[in-house]
């Protein structure tokens, strides 16, 4: 995975004028890295969560491993992945994989909690009308677990958006690049732009996930969901 352009735009001057294209460029890069990390993390967390739900004895081990991975310092994990994959540090792949690993503990836990919260009476009723375990999972249990799953995605998304900036130390990381370049060149406007855009991006993504949850679960009272 490469950057969005061969020659990324650079910050000029000490103000915001003429630099909005720079903010936009790195915001898109930040969003792309965050989205890919969340998709990869969800793709791994879903089967792990289902395994922990179906085979209860496996859940403590799965949760333990993902929790340990979550405690590894982000910069250390990023460097180890870059060296271990032989991809070089100036590449987005180690950063995306590292961020995906950090989402596992959150996504697996919320998936299992959401599925376990489905009342036994509902599952028994599904079995009584002839639903197979797989059909019951897909048609009954997963839809009812959506609020918990979306809640986990919200936490994972905001956490991922904030952690993407760590890549700025190595010249990557979307808006994080503006942080470190601003400090290096003593340009406050560049730092403020990077921080402000990161916060705004996290808020927009969180609102989008809240709206998604409301669309997917129209039966859930708004007050109860909050």
Image: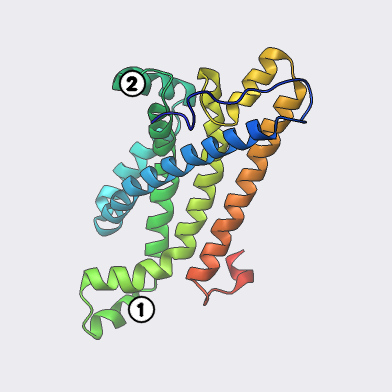
Q: Position of residue 208 (x, y in %)?
A: 57, 57
Which disc number belongs to residue 174? none
Residue neighbourhood size for the residue with mark 2, other residues' Cα within 10 Å, grouped as few (<14), some (14–19), many (≥20): few
Tell me, yes or no, whether the two marked residues, 2 and 1, touch with CB atoms within 8 Å: no
Distance between the Cα atoms at labels 2 and 1?
49 Å
Q: Residue at x 26, y 53 (%)?
A: 51
Above or below for 44 versus 8 = below
Q: Position of residue 9 (x, y in %)?
A: 60, 26
Q: Residue at x 52, y 64 (%)?
A: 213
**Relative to 180, is 147 on the left or the right?**
left
Q: Position of residue 10 (x, y in %)?
A: 63, 22
Residue denoted by label 2: 87
Q: Quadrant of residue 159?
A: top right
Farthest residue, direction bottom: 129
**Relative to 161, is 114 on the left or the right?**
left
Colouring method of the image: rainbow
Above or below for 146 versus 203 = below
Q: Residue at x 23, y 79 (%)?
A: 131
Residue closest to the eye, 79 or 4: 4
Residue denoted by label 1: 122
Residue closest to the eye, 66 or 212: 212
Say which quadrant the C terminus sits in.
bottom right
Q: Quadrant of residue 23?
A: top right
Single out the mark in the foreground, 2 or 1. 2
Q: Secondary structure at mark 1?
A: helix
Residue neighbourhood size for the residue with mark 1, other residues' Cα within 10 Å, grouped as few (<14), some (14–19), many (≥20): few
Q: Quadrant of residue 145?
A: bottom left
Q: How many marks?
A: 2
Q: Residue at x 42, y 70 (%)?
A: 144
Q: Secondary structure at mark 2?
A: loop
Above or below for 36 versus 80 = below
Say which quadrant the N terminus sits in.
top left
């Amino acid at each position: 995975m490469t950057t969005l352009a061969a020659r990324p735009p650079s910050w000029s001057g000490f103000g915001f004028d003429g630099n909005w294209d720079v903010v936009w460029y790195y915001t898109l890069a930040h969003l792309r890295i965050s989205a890919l990390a969340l998709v990869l993390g969800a793709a791994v967390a879903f089967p792990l969560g289902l395994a922990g739900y179906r085979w209860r004895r496996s859940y403590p081990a799965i949760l333990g491993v993902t929790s340990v991975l979550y405690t590894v310092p982000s910069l250390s994990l990023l460097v180890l992945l870059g060296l271990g994959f032989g991809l070089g540090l100036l590449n987005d792949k180690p950063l995306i994989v590292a961020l995906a690993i950090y989402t596992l503990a959150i996504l697996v836990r919320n998936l299992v909690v959401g599925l376990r919260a489905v009342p036994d009476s509902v599952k028994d009723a599904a079995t009584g009308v002839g639903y197979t375990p797989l059909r019951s999972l897909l048609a009954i249990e997963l839809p009812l677990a959506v609020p918990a799953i979306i809640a986990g995605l919200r936490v994972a998304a905001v956490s991922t958006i904030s952690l993407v900036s760590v890549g700025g130390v190595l010249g990557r990381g979307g808006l994080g690049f503006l942080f470190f370049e601003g400090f290096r060149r003593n340009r406050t406007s560049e730092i403020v732009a990077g921080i402000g855009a990161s916060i705004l991006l996290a808020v927009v993504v969180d609102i989008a996930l809240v709206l998604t949850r409301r669309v997917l679960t129209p039966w859930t009272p708004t007050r109860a969901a909050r």
